[in-house]
Image: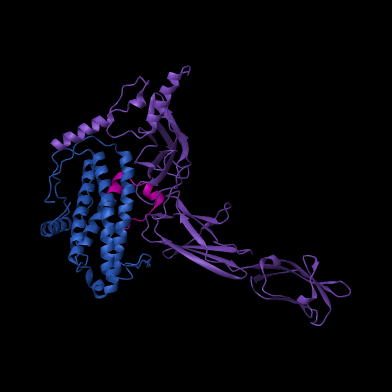
Amino acid sequence: MELRAGDSWGIFTFLCAALCNLPALPALNCTEELGPGHSIQKTYDLTRYLEHQLRTLAGTYLNYLGPPFNEPDFNPPRLARAERVPSATVDLELWRGLTDNARLAANYRAYSRVLCSLRALDAQGTAELRHRLGHFCSSLQGLVLSIAGVMSSLGYPLPAGPPAQPPAQAGAAATNDFLKKMDDFWLLKELQTWLWRSAKDFNRLKKKVPPAVVTLRMEARGF
Amino acid sequence: FDSHIQYERVGADVTMKCGSMDWDSAVTWTANGTDIDESHLNGSYLILKNVDLSQSGQYSCYEGSSWHLKYQTYLRVGVPPKEPVLMCRSNNYPKGFYCSWHLPTPTYIPNSFNISVIHGTREMVCEKDVFPKNRCHIRYLQLFSTVKYKVTLTVTNALGKSSTTLTFDEFAIVKPDPPESVVAKPVPNNPRRLEVSWQNPSSWPDPESFPLKFFLRYRPLILDQWQHVELSDGTSHTITDAYAGKEYIIQVAAKDNDIGTWSDWSVAVHATPWTEEPKHLTTEAQITETTSTSTSSFMPPPTTKICDKGAVVGSGAVAVCWTAGLVLAAYSILFI
């Protein structure tokens, strides 16, 4: 999945903007009916792939932020600030009792918000960092679409798009460089946790929906 | 009077006073009932220089003439604690985790342990286990936490204290117990197969939502090199490339499908693949034939051989020429 810098930036910027600002889902160009079980497996595989990609991306980004963010034992208290992404943390019994719809919707909402926030990430760093970030956003968008695909194949409505937010994270945060870096740190942490949680969410969904043997063909969107 | 107990460091100089007796009183000291030589006395004080562990014991002081017991103390010689070794692990995810600890070197005197677990701003209670003693467990209140857990263990004794801290993510400490009930059996009429089966560790509470994957390793006893197979589901596997007639040692390990680390290896099981019943040896010729057969199956099958005739002799089964098939497949791919 190697992307040339020029191609991918234009495309993903457009797609991120579309995803962030339109409540409607961009049509899935599927030429055949998806078995929900198969798409769940594919979504699960995507979360594992993203989790792997995130390790490299997070390492690069935290190094860019510099100490103390890139120290392995960095364990700051969670400041009471506006949450950009709904938290993956949940009570065990509550998590067990989630309906399939609620489970999928929670994942969809979380990754949609992460996608927008990542786009707004301050990546004035190296070209390598911007490239990694771009690549990651493309993959993350694939995950969002995949979750949407599962939801629609199971007949669930998609949650409303994220509230229109100015991409830059408001005046207050911008004035304090350290706090902004903290926000970025927690964004990556929350994303990492969501990817771990999604693996478990999709494991549970896999058990409930048996995989159908159907070929999946999706028209490439310039990837 | 009351009895005392005193703790002193190895190598320290100890001075014991005979209770309220004056310095110039005439006293006799005993150690565990044995009189102590006067050279160790400074007046009525007992001086022990550079104490070692063997000097632990009961010291008593008697008034000279009346032989009245005036003072008694129990001397315990020891050392302050070194930094303890702490380990935390979740073998029952998502229920919770446990922490266990020990001292790297003994202190020779009683120690007390205090453990604190902090999660974000909340202090959690780690419930001490009855057995083993140096262990406590915690139930997760929430799952998929972004905030790390910080566990601090402090060891204290009469001579000092020491502590150590562990900080970790919920996911990082997940390590199941090894698989249980590992069984390996030969497969009738299949001299190169072994059927292995096992069970999820009983401590893993929810394999449905939190499935385990497995790693199997096996080797014949006569070789050092292990062969490995990773299995993403199921609790059984058939080994199909065992050397005929050789005893195998087999072990299995488990891991949560997505997070944490591999368990320790299970208890090892031994098994030998099925071999045909040896014919009753009545003639020289038959003995020679049996010897040559077992020699050829001792060598790893050379790559040029297409079919492993030695292994299927007498089995009556259809010989499956795996190597031939692979060679043909490789050639056809080359020519596509």
Examine the image and state in which quarter residue A81 appears.
bottom left
Colour used to depict chain A in the structure image: blue
Whether the magenta-drawn stretch holds residue A96 is answered as yes
Q: Is residue B18 visible?
A: no
Q: What x and y, as percent, mark residue A18?
A: 14, 56
Residue situated furthest top in the rendering: B282
Observer-nearest residue: B6 or B270?
A: B270
Residue in the foreground of this view, choosing between A25 and B201: B201
Q: Disc count in the image? A: 0
Q: Which residues are magenta?
A: A87-105
Chain identifier for the purple-coloured part of the image: B
Residue drawn at (57%, 52%) of the image: B132
Q: Is residue B195 left or right of residue A181?
A: right
Q: Residue B281, position in %: x, y? A: 47, 19
Q: Is residue B31 left or right of residue A130?
A: right
**Hey, which quadrant is residue B220 in on the image?**
top left
Is the residue A124 above or below the residue A217 in the image?
Answer: below
Q: Please tell me whether residue B57 belongs to the stretch shown in magenta.
A: no
Whether residue A209 is visible here, answered yes or no, is yes
Q: Is residue A144 left or right of residue A87?
A: left
Q: Residue furthest right?
A: B66
- Position of residue B10 relative to residue B177, above or below, is below
